[in-house]
Image (cartoon, rainbow, N blue to C red):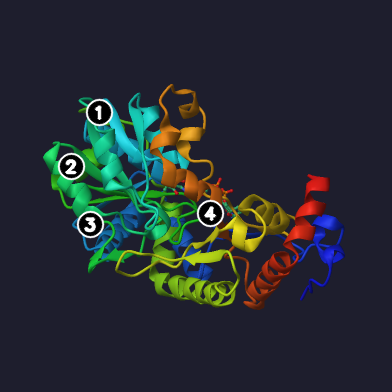
Amino acid sequence: MKKFVNLNSLASFGAPPAFASPLVVGFPQTPNRDKFYERLEVIFSRNCLTNNGPMVRDLETKFAESCGVRYASAFTNGTVALQTLIRALDLKGEIIVPSFSFIGTAHAVSWLGLTPVFADINKYTCTIEPESVKQAITSKTSAIIGVHLFGNCCDIDNLRRIADKYNLRLIFDAAQAFGCSCRGSMIGSFGEAEVFSLHATKVLHGFEGGMITTQTKELHDRLCLLRNFGFTHYDRVESIGTNAKMTEPAAAMALTNLENFEDIRAHGQKIQEKYSRLLSEIPGIQVWSQTSEGQSNNRYIVILVAEKEFGLSRDQLYALCHYENIIARRYFYPGCHRMAPYNSRKTDDDHKLQNTLWWAERCLVLPNGPLDNLSDIEVITNLFWFLHANAAEVKQELEKIQ
Ligand code: T4K
């Protein structure tokens, strides 16, 4: 276990890194691989590799059950699923999205030729702020996309009220929120539909993948039509469509992970608890946790760095971590509105998105793997304590090499 005793023991100033290979955010969890290999054999023996095969259908049924909804439709990935949902609902004009999200949320809207209009987040919950949504509504607005960021549920009731009042559609980007609940209901059951990502970095993965849950049969049927070129029969097409189908091996992976989901969650919980316990004593480091009342998927270790109290800025801490092979991530810096192409707009988004900027400057997501040995978290904590105790000196030396 690396000890931090003086500046020379930091990798930034020439010492070997704390970890020989990188610790990463979004480390894929894949228990019970034997079951997955068994399923692969089944796939080959059936010779049905894709096109809404039995594994996909089985996954859809079990996914819908676990979200407490009637329907789930599987997709190639979360982004394409979101695009297909926007098409299926025939949305037009402007769609309100939070700026503080993965860029995929806004891009899904732009990809279809519509305009994402950015709303702020709530400083406490880090999800889209209903008051800011209200201010973003224009005569062209057709929908609101709430994002359950880091698995934290949006303010469903107030978003619903706004959507009803202004006659807008309400859907959710639940890419990061599989397995989370809010006041007794699973995420997946809110709004007209919710979109999940099953990317390798997600709590439940199928290598890549996406899923849309809904209670409405018409919408579900339309999604299934659109994801398969609009085919209703061998040579009958009913509408424009795309190819957004999930493959059988992806479904086999997701099914296997779904069966082991409680183990995945429990492992995440252990990691999160250890980080929280050890880091929460450090001045200027706030370990953020889910604010919505319900179960978490324990996937994201989110901290907020207060420069004044900690002694170093979030960006300095980020850089020092990377030297040590602790590949923390600045999700979702700098905010979508500050990324191309959205940053070329003439609107004064910064002014309206103060909480987004606040989070973008302070938020750091810490690695969740590979941490076979939870004492790795102690090494990270020791580093943070050392940096805090020697902040002025570290800052000075860091400025020389940056
Ligand atoms: N909406 C929201 C709110 C989202 O968070 C996302 C995706 C979407 C929509 C779109 O869903 P998808 O179309 O992706 O299904 C990652 C993921 O690519 C993305 O899925 C995710 N959100 C986003 C938050 O993170 P990157 O580029 O920041 O991460 P990446 O690919 O560098 O992976 C992070 C770390 O995970 C790596 O440093 C190493 C580790 N890793 C990753 C992969 C893929 C592994 O150890 N093994 C792997 O196979 O985007």
Mark 1: amino acid: Asp
**How many angstroms separate mark 2 from mark 4 (CA)?**
30 Å
User: Which quarter of the figure has residue 390?
Assistant: bottom right
For the residue labelled by badge 4, is the local secondary structure a helix, a strand or a loop?
Answer: strand
Who comes first in sequence, dot 3 or dot 1? 3
For the residue labelled by badge 1, is the local secondary structure a helix, a strand or a loop?
Answer: loop
Image-based side of 333 in relation to 322, left or right = left
Q: Mark 2 or mark 3, which is nearer to you? A: 2
Who comes first in sequence, dot 2 or dot 4? 2
**How many angstroms separate mark 3 from mark 4 (CA)?**
29 Å
**Residue 146 position in % (x across, y down):** 31, 46
Mark 3: amino acid: Ser
- Residue at image coords 18%, 57%: 70
Q: Mark 3 or mark 1, which is nearer to you? A: 3
Instruction: List the residue tagged with mark 3.
Output: 189
**How many angstroms separate mark 3 from mark 1 (CA)?**
35 Å
- Residue at image coords 49%, 28%: 343
Does the rendering let one see residue 166?
A: yes
Who comes first in sequence, dot 4 or dot 1? 1
Q: Mark 2 or mark 4, which is nearer to you? A: 4
On residue 363, the disc is: 4
**How many angstroms separate mark 2 from mark 3 (CA)?**
16 Å
Instruction: List the residue tagged with mark 1.
Output: 235
**Residue 399 position in % (x across, y down):** 78, 47
Question: Decide: marks 2, 3 in contact (CB < 8 A)?
Answer: no
Label 1 crowd bin: few (<14), some (14–19), many (20+), radius 10 Å? few
Label 4 crowd bin: few (<14), some (14–19), many (20+), radius 10 Å? many
Mark 4: amino acid: Cys
Mark 2: amino acid: Ala
For the residue labelled by badge 3, is the local secondary structure a helix, a strand or a loop?
Answer: loop
